[in-house]
Image (cartoon, helix red, strand yellow):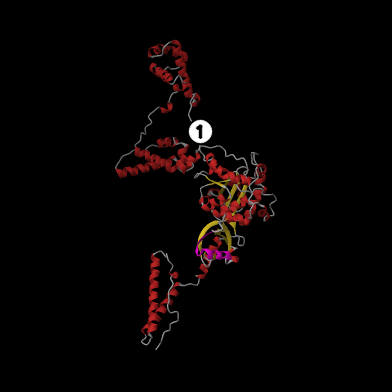
Amino acid sequence: MSRSTFLKLHKKNNQQEYDEDHTGKSEVFDERSYKDLSSFREDIANEALFRLRILRQISRDCEQINIKTIEPLRVKLQRKFQRDIPSTITIYRWWLAYRKADYNIVSLAPKINKRGNRTVKVPKVVSAFMDQAINDVISAKQINIQSAFRRVRRKIRQYNLVHGTHYKYPNYESIRKRVKKLTPFEKIAARKGERAAKREFRRMGKRILTSNVLERVEIDHTWLDLFAVDNDSRVTIGRPYLTQLVDCYSKAVIGFYLGFEPPSYISVSLALKNAIQRKEKLLAQYPSIKNEWICYGIPDLIVTDNAKEFLSENFGRACESLLIILHQNKVETPDNKPHVERQYGTTNTSLINDLPGKAFSNYLQREGYDSIGEATLTLDEIKEIYLLWLVDIYHKKPNKRGTNCPNVTWRQGAKEWAPDEFEGTSEELDFHFAILDQKMLTDIGITLCKELDYSSDRLAEYRGKKGNHKVKFKYNPEHMGFIWVIDEDQEEYFKVPAIEYEYASTVSLWQHKINLEIKEKLNNSDYNEDEEIDTEIAIEEIVHESIRKKKTSITNKKRAARYLEHSERAKSQKNNDIVLDEKKSPSSIETDVDDDSDWDIDYV
């Protein structure tokens, strides 16, 4: 049975099994605690042994241990052990505790940590001020006790003045002791929040195990710590984004997207399409790359975080059509996809740190380095450098422990279980990742966006059967030359080109929207609202003057009045539109004119 057939039969059935095995639930484990003398400090353990020797000596000298039998033996015990012997009642209490614990020596260990008065000796108000001050100054790398001490005194002084109380100021030593008692968990919780503290001191699970390539693939984005410049002007234009897919079995990067498209469904689909396809055409664009990028194929499982692009219906629909199982990690659990997170660290330390225009997340690391001014690499050059490092260095180099080499591990895994290769064309792959939408079918065709209309003979014939109605279609936002429209009768999609195909085939949807904004600005560059209002006022004056003429014909008077009526109605509608947050554009109001002939003004 072929791999693709096997996947179709078993992949969906295995999803529930995977969810049950990889939800992060703890295995059934006995978490009872145990104690022996090694659980205690050395001095406490020695004291427990001393008490045990005393009880053993008493049990040899008398048949029953009680207060009457213990008292005569105290002098003998003093001579034998050469140290002070406690009172008779104390020794008897040791015996009672030892017998009650079923003769467990742990019961003889002194409970030193429970001694003393543990109640807070300062008033609750003062104690609250002390805790608050410590939390306020704990954000520094080293806690400044002196600052906390001064802050407590100021708070107490203000409280006494407002409430007429006479609380005393705590001394410096009491603040220092309270800071010393803080646990590492409490320090991180005060500095970064309780959630960060729980993540820092979380329980570590077992390592993720995989048995073949593409069994588990992790995906994530990052904002590169590197500035790029424009191809022509060499002006710095910003930091690009990098999306990577990492195979957990071989630790190889199987696909990527590098560009200025922010994390979105578009960048995810571009990276995943790159991962699925073979890389010969891509590497042919870069003659400087000497080796092959051997990774390709449809992943069995993709592990993501909870970003909106991974939760979108389009992404889920595309993965479902390719029989890819999706698994979203819990919120703020980056350790559940460690391979892609570690890969970004490797990319930064091994590649980006040595490139001009390196950006620093910590301003103290910059040391006067001008990242923007030092940037010299274009986006194409950054992409070529990234591919050179990835294909010719990272994939061919074993890790520091010598336990894995991405290319070697991939080849071995591919021999045992060949990658599931996509057998269709690149256009068919684009169709799987196309965005599903719904618009009205009219005599124009389908208008996806302003100045983006689509029509064809088959679409016109389909409209002739169904009439004007909403139709479902799919489009590739990176190529607006055509769309796929569903034929509900045939239950299939057919291709419909753009009316302005030469233009639409060269732009993405985002580019087209930017072009519309630029066009609108250019069209409005010569527009002057004050001049328009002055012209309207001049027209109204001419109309009023014509009405006042005695020999003006009744027809022209009527038409002039009608003009004024329309003008007032239009102004009233415009005012209403402003109040209603311009829900309806005034320019969309059409004026119905019964008489289309021009009207003239008769002059005496």
Q: Is residue 338 left or right of residue 139?
A: right
Q: Say whether residue 366 is visible.
A: no
Q: Nearer the viewer, residue 89 or 483?
A: 483
In magenta, the rendered stretch is 454-473
Query: In the picture shown, does residue 337 fall above or below 53?
Result: below
Q: Please, what is the three-letter code of the amino acid marked with disc 1?
A: Val
Is 524 situated above or below 472? below
Is 166 situated left or right of 148 in this image?
Answer: left
Front residue of 523/56: it is 523
- Quadrant hosting residue 17: top right
In the rendering, at what x and y percent does residue 422 appear?
A: 63, 51
Label count reads 1
Q: Quadrant of the C terminus?
A: bottom left
Q: Position of residue 361 (x, y in %)?
A: 54, 49
- Which residue is the site of mark 1? 28
Answer whether residue 559 is magenta in the image: no
- The vertical placement of 244 against 39, above or below, is below
